[in-house]
Structure formats: structure tokens, C-alpha cells
Amino acid sequence: MIVTLVITVLVEGAVVIGYSLWRNKPVQPILLTSIFGNLITQSFLWVVLNLFFQNYLITLSLSEFLIWVVESALLYYIPANRLHLTDAIILSLAMNLASFGLGWVLPL
Amino acid sequence: MQLKFRKMFLLCVLVFLPKHVVHADTGPKPSMDFEFKQELTGEPLTIISGVLYECDQSDCSDATPLEEVGPQGLSCGPQSCRAIGYGFAPFHRLEIEFSDGQTRQSNVFETAGFDSKYTVTVRPNDLLVEAQFGLGVLLPTGIVIMACLCALVVLGLVVGLVVFLVRRSRKN
């Protein structure tokens, strides 16, 4: 779980930094929000996957969707991030697609 | 300031350019670890190859080998095997070829958890697979506590979202 969390934070951190530089947004608060958000959402993912391991794909899909919504909300509601709702949703989607996509193909 | 962040970004990119296959995972996948012990006399056997059969029936009459798709599959070392999958069937059977030229099959066993650990006893004519007693048995309590904490956090966020939307609609 720790390895998963660290790699997710690094991948999503890279996306956050790239997005913030591209759209001229404050990097530090968005990065901190992403790290804090990942602590919550990765714990959540770990718990639900352990609880419902017999339905892995359904559990993973639903959880990832919920994670996207929660991280979008976190990014949007923290004023220091200066993100519009659309920005927050797009950034959260990009972050999660990057980490999920990489995780999908990497061997453990 | 921007230059500093660009450097940080480049550093992150470099970190993610692996020289070899990265043995890590950002989307956790179910796994099974098999640790072998021998009940045989004589020279210790080593594993040559292995197949993990997936079954929906409890007698494994519908067994099909675990497909090799991306990271999914069974990989074996001389004394252990590890399976990763995009989800596992409820029942399994292990078939291992050993250095003595003999291929042994195991009993039918169930998926023990998300990251299951098994002890495989190598017997003269077959294998005995047993789920390991360990943290996994105590895990449900921890999982329930974590689940409650996560539920609280998610609930808090949802309530916050509702309150915010209500306040905003009143202002408008």
C-alpha cells in the first residue's frame, strides 16, 4: 500500500506540476491538496478492494469514479488552489487517468 | 520561481523514466504468494514452471489457466511463485513442474483475500495448498476501522458540498 501511495503521489504530482505550469496556477497548494487527497483516497481504495476483492473490476471502477469526484471537490473547494470547477474536474481526471493507466500496465 | 518548478517537473519526468521494468503499482491488483516447503527426502526440488488454474466451480471441473495479459500471470522462482491478476476466480488449482521431471497438481483452494499468501507442501505425488495464518485473519477489524474513517471523511466532503451548494443557491 505504501509503495502504491508513493508512486501515485509522484505520478499525480508530476501531472499537477505540469498542469499548474501550463495554466499558470499555484503549484504548491494544488500539490499539497493532491498529496492530502491521495492519503484519503488511496486508504479508501485499499479498504474497499480488501473488502470486495472477489469483485475486483467492479469495485475498482466504482472506487476510481468516486475518487475522481472527491479529488475534484477537494481541488475546487480549497480557495488557495484558484481552480474553477471545470479546471478541478479536468485536473483530477488527468491525475487519476495517469496513475490508473500506469498502474494498469505495470507489473507488481 | 517558474524555472524552479520547471526543474522540479523535469526531475519528476526523469524519475519516471525507468532503466528497467518497474516492479511497482499505482492501481493495486489482487495477488497470490505461494511459498513452497518439501515433505520429500533427498535433494531439494526446484520449480521449473507452473500454471495456475482458475475455476468457478468448487470442484474445479471448469478449470482454465490464468491468462497472461500484461502484468497478469503466474511467475515462479526456484522456491516460490507469485500470481497477479485483474481479479481472480473464487477457486484455484496449482500445477507445478519440478526439477525431478514430475508435474504435481494441488488440491482446489479458495481465494483467501486481496493479497493472499499460501503455503504449498510438496508431497511425493501432489501438492497441498493452504492459506497462511497471519495478519490476514486480523485484517477484517483493521479494514472495518479504516472503512469507518474513510466513510467519515467521504461523508464530511459530501455534507460540505451540499452545504456549499445550498448556501450558493441562497445567495443567488
Image: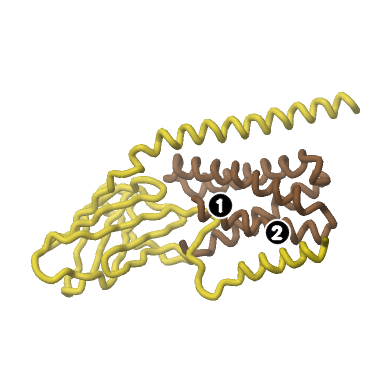
Chain colours: A brown, B yellow
At 60% from the left edge and 60% from the top edge, which residue is drawn? A101
Which amino acid lies under the numbered mark 1 shown in the image of this protein?
Leu
Which residue is denoted by mark 2 in the rendering? A15
Pick out the residue farthest to the right: B172
Q: Which disc is residue A43 wearing?
A: none
Depth check, front residue: B127 or B146: B146
Pick out the residue farthest to the top: B170
Pick out the residue farthest to the left: B41
For label 2, the crowd category at 10 Å Cα-Cα, with few meaning under 14, some 14 to 19 and many 20 or more, is many
Q: Which part of the image, by quadrant, shows the C terminus of chain B?
A: top right
In the rendered view, does A65 fall on the left or right side of B34?
right
At 31% from the left edge and 50% from the top edge, which residue is drawn? B91
**Depicted A73 relative to depicted B4: above or below:** above
Which amino acid lies under the numbered mark 2 shown in the image of this protein?
Val
Report the chain holding disc 1: A
In the rendered view, does A87 fall on the left or right side of A2?
right
**Depicted B84 relative to depicted A45: above or below:** below
SS category of the residue bearing label 1: helix
Q: CA distance from mark 1 to mark 2?
A: 15 Å
Which residue is denoted by mark 1 in the rendering? A5
**Depicted A43 relative to depicted B63: above or below:** above
Q: Which part of the image, by quadrant, shows the N terminus of chain B?
A: bottom right
Which badge, 1 or 2, comes first in the chain's sequence? 1
Residue B67 lies, in percent from the top left, at: 40, 64
At 55% from the left edge and 32% from the top edge, which residue is drawn? B149
Residue A32 lies, in percent from the top left, at: 70, 48
Within the image, what quadrant is residue B81 found in? bottom left
SS category of the residue bearing label 2: helix
Report the chain holding disc 2: A
At 20% from the left edge and 74% from the top edge, which residue is drawn? B99
